[in-house]
Image: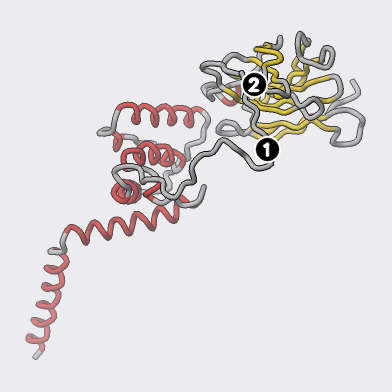
Amino acid sequence: MRTSRALTIGTLLLGICLTLGAAPPAVAQGNQASEGGQLAARHCSECHLEPHPDILPRQSWQTALGYMGLLMGMRDLDWLAGEPEVGRNTVAARRDVLLREGAIPDNPALSENNWEALRDYYVESAPEAPLPQENRPPLRWELPRFRIVESDYRVPGAVTTLVHIRAETGEAYIGDSALNTLTVLGTDGRIKLAGQRPPTNIYPIDIVFMDDTAYVGSIGDLDASRPTEDRLAHISALELVDGGINGAPASIVVGGLYRMADMAVADLNGAGRLDFVACGYGHVPGRTSWFEARAD
């Protein structure tokens, strides 16, 4: 009796093992995709909304995953060996920047097997080509309740980092960080002052007019190629001439800022003096800083 029961159990176990071993590749791949999807839901959503694989074509996912993997401590890029050189170089350059800034975790968030499963989930589930954009309304050269004014401002190769409408005059101030200039357009959209380059070297991202002064925020490091701690961003004060910036003398009033994305100028503490708030999160690390003006 006991021998018969043992034989029966052994036969069942052998059958189960043979069944699992003979599982078709599609089932194994499905299990891996399911595991990769679960890993994506767990890890990708820690920094942003979990992306669906169909938002990018298959080839683009390799570079995107390389970027994201660095932030999870996945420094080894050998898995990109078979990818186009431009993609490998792009991810490697980003790794160098993050290493320099100390932004790559020392301990990987995933094992190599789990990292491979997560990558395979996105690459294998992604479409070969970008999905067509459906049900998009046609573009129209109009805007309800606004009047379109065409401009003669045409600068080949411009890197426009600032567009500001000066409320009291209706003028438009255009900042070009390729040429480090400010251009002023009149209310008719025509160029009123072309390519003004202040004495302080600027990469303009913001401008604030206060009485007889224009404060210009400069990003400092336009393409984010320099170390963050170089702190090249600054705020300049342009002393207006006849209410405008043409020929206005300039000086740096706040220097040594992180790569700046925005700023505000106001008397924050009611002391009768203008203070400055600079948002310096335009690179890897950064901070928001309040600079209080003093009597001296």
Residue 54 at x, y percent in the picture: 37, 49
Which amino acid is tagged 2? Gly
Q: Residue at x 29, y 38 (%)?
A: 79
The quarter of the rendered structure image containing the C terminus is top right
Residue placed at 65% from the left, 12% from the top?
195
User: Which mark is nearer the camera, 2 or 1?
Assistant: 1
- In terms of sequence position, does the residue under pointer 2 or pointer 1 come before the other? 1
Q: Report x, y in % for residue 65.
A: 38, 41
Q: Residues within 10 Å of mark 2 (few under 14, many from 20)?
A: many
Q: Quadrant of the N terminus?
A: bottom left
Left or right: 85 as drawn, with respect to 274: left
Please state which amino acid type lies under the numbered disc 1: Phe
Q: Residue at x 51, y 35 (%)?
A: 103
Between 112 and 273, the residue placed more toward the observer is 273
- Which residue lies at the image location 85% right of the left edge and 19% below the top edge? 212
Label 1 neighbour load within 10 Å: few <14, some 14-19, many 20+: few
SS for dot 2: strand
Question: Where on the picture, by quarter, is residue 258?
Answer: top right
Q: Report helix, strand or loop for mark 1.
A: loop
Q: Is residue 88 above or below residue 40?
A: above
181 shown above or below 105: above
Residue 258 visible: no
Most foreground residue, 228 or 124: 124
Vertical arrangement, residue 89 with respect to residue 106, above or below: above
The answer to whether 267 appears left or right of 16 in the picture is right
* Relative image position of residue 208 (x, y in whole percent): 76, 27
Q: Viewed as shown, does residue 128 lie left or right of 178?
A: left
Q: Are marks 2 and 1 in contact (CB under 8 Å)?
A: no
Whether residue 69 is visible to the viewer of this picture, yes or no, is: yes
Q: Which residue is mark 2?
A: 175
The residue under label 1 is 146
Above or below for 220 versus 267: above
